[in-house]
Amino acid sequence: MHKLSILLYSALIALLFVQCQDDTITETPLENNPATDDVITVDQDITEDVIWVAGNTYVLDDLITVSDNATLTIEPCVLVKAANGATGLVIAKGARLDAQGTADCPIIFTSTDDQLEPGDIVSPNLTGEDVGLWAGIFLLGDAPVSRATPSNILS
């Protein structure tokens, strides 16, 4: 049952990043683009445009924030692993996340406890019982919000 839960959770995450149209992703060479099949530890906030390249595993060593109008581009087939339960990814107001996985090549967010390798979709060792290993992705924006005020609570 736990494997099914993990699979469903992974599928839902993948669906969040599936592109609705058939665009080709063009990799822009940047100085911070590593070779593929590498494990890259991310231990500092992202303050300039960065591309996480397909086939690589990115290990978040802390709560990482994308800020200062930077864009984090995550290509399909990227594996992002959290080093501890408090680790997550924050997209701050003004920053951008461009993550477009596909059904065949999803972007997967999981834990360093997971033995999942790039190209795998189902964890070989974690189950649905293994919770709290990833804090999540937090999108902060400037949209209007509806909140309770004393006048509309009492009405």
Image (tube, rainbow, N blue to C red):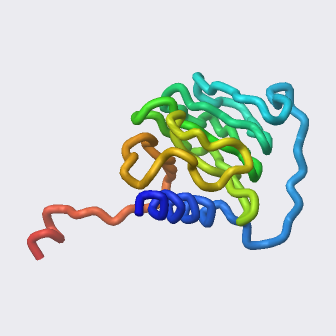
Q: Is residue 100 left or right of residue 29?
A: left
Q: Quadrant of residue 104?
A: bottom right
Camera-nearest residue between 146 and 115: 115
Task: Please provide percent x and percent y for residue 7.
Answer: 53, 61
Q: Is residue 97 left or right of residue 29?
A: left
Q: Quadrant of the N terminus?
A: bottom left
Task: Please provide percent x and percent y for residue 19.
Answer: 73, 66
Camera-nearest residue between 61 and 73: 61
Task: Please provide percent x and percent y for residue 87.
Answer: 46, 34
At 14% from the left edge and 69% from the top edge, which residue is drawn? 153
Task: Please provide percent x and percent y for residue 91.
Answer: 55, 43
Q: Is residue 147 above or below residue 152?
A: above
Q: Quadrant of residue 32?
A: top right
Q: Is residue 100 above or below residue 113?
A: below
Camera-nearest residue between 133 and 143: 133
Q: Quadrant of the C terminus?
A: bottom left
Does the image show residue 9? yes
* Figure label count: 0
Camera-nearest residue between 27 and 60: 60
Q: Is residue 81 above or below residue 1?
A: above
At 51% from the left edge and 65% from the top edge, which residue is drawn? 8
Residue ranking furthest to the left: 154
Q: Quadrant of residue 150?
A: bottom left
Residue ranking furthest to the bottom: 155
Does the image show residue 92? no
At 82% from the left edge and 31% from the top edge, which residue is drawn? 33
At 64% from the left edge and 25% from the top edge, which residue is drawn? 41
